[in-house]
């Protein structure tokens, strides 16, 4: 037997049920609203932090761009300096070392031969004119220029003209010399 005696009418039971249902749904709605509010607050904070991090990164990028723009003059100076260095380097690599040419030439001139002019006629050619005490010294000078020694700069020497001066018995001569510019550049 049922010991629970309920003296409530059916309408009162329905009202009680409705009131319990409203109470439960209100509590559920409040809990749900608090959960949604908490999640909203959490995502709002994350979005705000992300926005401030994006702003800070944008500021750092702007500062870095400003520094790069400030260095443009330095970059231009560095490029110009490199171009100048390249030109000077090319000059030193391609220059003809005339001092070695003249030293070598001087070692070939016998005593009694006097050089009056030395003219460069383009790449690798020299015209020499001068006087010698006799024809033998001119011949010796020509042989010296054409000799095959280890540091031979002159590849060919030809006598262009020779004439005897009647007054002092000296010989005026003109010699055309071809030289190897790679040897005096130091590239050979």
Image (spheres, grey):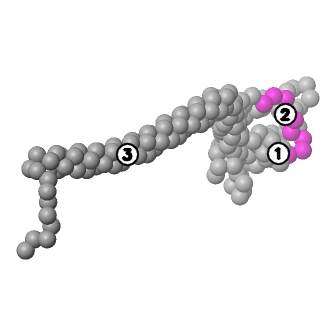
Q: Is residue 94 visible?
A: yes
Which residue is located at x 65 percent, y 32 percent?
Answer: 67
Task: Give yes or no for contact between labels 2 and 3 (Cβ–Cβ under 8 Å).
Answer: no
| Magenta stretch, residue numbers | 110-118
Q: Give coordinates of residue 77: x percent, y percent.
A: 69, 30
Task: Identify the element where label 1 is drawn.
Answer: helix
Residue 114 part of the magenta segment: yes
Cα–Cα gap, marks 2 and 1: 14 Å
Residue 148 vs residue 68, the one in the foreground = 68
Task: Identify the element where label 3 is drawn.
Answer: helix
**Residue pointed to by mark 1:** 103
Which residue is located at x 30 percent, y 48 percent?
Answer: 27
Front disc: 1 or 3? 3
Q: Is residue 75 visible?
A: no
**Residue pointed to by mark 3:** 34
Residue 66 part of the magenta segment: no
């Amino acid at each position: 037997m049922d010991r629970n005696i309920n003296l409530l009418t059916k309408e009162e039971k329905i009202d009680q049920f409705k009131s319990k249902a409203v109470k439960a749904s209100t509590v559920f709605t409040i809990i749900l609203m608090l959960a949604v509010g908490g999640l909203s607050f959490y995502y709002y904070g994350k979005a705000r932090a992300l926005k401030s991090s994006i702003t800070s990164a944008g500021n750092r990028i702007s500062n870095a761009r400003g520094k790069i723009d400030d260095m443009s003059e330095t970059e231009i100076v560095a490029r110009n300096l490199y171009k100048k260095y390249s030109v000077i380097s090319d000059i030193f690599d391609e220059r003809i070392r005339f001092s070695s040419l003249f030293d070598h030439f001087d070692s070939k001139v016998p005593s009694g031969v006097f050089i009056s002019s030395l003219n460069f006629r383009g790449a690798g050619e020299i015209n020499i004119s001068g006087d010698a005490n006799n024809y033998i010294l001119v011949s010796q000078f020509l042989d010296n220029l054409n000799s095959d020694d280890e540091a031979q700069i002159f590849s060919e020497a030809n006598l262009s003209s020779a004439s005897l001066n009647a007054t002092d018995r000296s010989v005026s001569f003109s010699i055309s010399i071809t030289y190897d510019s790679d040897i005096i550049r130091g590239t050979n």
